[in-house]
Image (cartoon, rainbow, N blue to C red):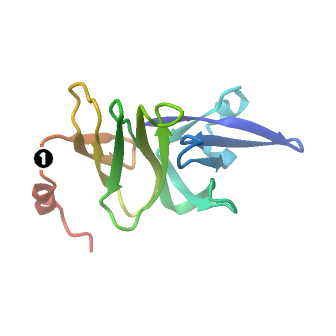
Amino acid sequence: MTTIKLYKNIVDNRVFYYAERGSRRGTHFRLWVHYSFLPFECRFQDNPKLYLPLRNARIDKGKKDTTLIARPDQDHWITEFFVQCGFRGYSEFTVKEPDVQVFKYTVYSSPAGRLGISEGGLIMIPNRLEAITISWHKSGHLYGSQSDGTVIIYKDGQVEELEDTDLCELEDLGEPAD
């Protein structure tokens, strides 16, 4: 389960919630969140939090390229994935399922990105998929951590990391969807 820190914006006695994703220098956006996605007790806190994965939700693009809006929807669910890069390196990921929508952002480890550029993203998945498979890669000084891998994220928030497994071997195990 992923936790996102939210901010409040009060206009005309109405409270709007949003989250900042990414670095200003790279790809970034502001995600406006429908109030119904917050637990009731979080709405009265100074620093409310949003817990992902979010069921029955979708992401729409706003008028600006840097604006996203999370709205209720019965056909999708939303999760987030982030890969921290190594020192002076970069990171990237790809989602294996073809019909998911990914809103990627970058996080700079220093103001100019010389210490590394990490990649993350919000992922909107159709409800018919119970899980998604993500392959990731990172470079730089990793200090013993692995440079690439495969992760399965389930609808209930469980994350399963597949180590030293060839994805071709896994495809043989899968059952055809339709």
In the rendered image of this protein, does residue 60 appear above or below residue 35? below
Q: Is residue 81 visible?
A: no
Q: Please state which of residues 18 and 67 is positioned toward the viewer in this rendering.
A: 67
In the rendered image of this protein, does residue 116 appear above or below residue 177? above
Q: Position of residue 19 (x, y in %)?
A: 62, 41
In the rendered image of this protein, does residue 74 appear above or below residue 159? below
In the rendered image of this protein, does residue 20 appear above or below residue 104? above
Q: In the image, what residue occupies the spot 71% across and 26% down?
A: 46
Q: Is residue 104 left or right of residue 62?
A: left
Q: Position of residue 28 (x, y in %)?
A: 57, 47
Q: Quadrant of the C terminus?
A: bottom left
Q: Please state which of residues 80 and 129 is positioned toward the viewer in this rendering.
A: 80
- Tag 1's secondary structure? loop
Q: Residues within 10 Å of mark 1 (few under 14, many from 20)?
A: few
Number of marks in picture? 1
Q: Is residue 155 visible?
A: yes
Q: In the image, what residue occupies the spot 12% across and 59% down?
A: 168
Question: Which three-letter amino acid code belongs to the residue tagged 1?
Answer: Thr
Residue at the bottom extreme? 178
Q: Which residue is mark 1?
A: 165
Instruction: Identify the image quadrant of residue 177.
Output: bottom left
Q: Position of residue 57 (x, y in %)?
A: 55, 55
Q: In the image, what residue occupies the spot 55% across and 40% down?
A: 23
Q: Quadrant of the N terminus?
A: top left
Instruction: Identify the image quadrant of residue 22.
Output: top right
Residue at the right extreme? 12
Q: Please state which of residues 87 and 84 is positioned toward the viewer in this rendering.
A: 87
Q: Is residue 154 left or right of residue 23?
A: left
Q: Is residue 162 left or right of residue 72?
A: left
Q: Position of residue 148 (x, y in %)?
A: 23, 42
Q: In the image, what residue occupies the spot 28% across and 39% down?
A: 139
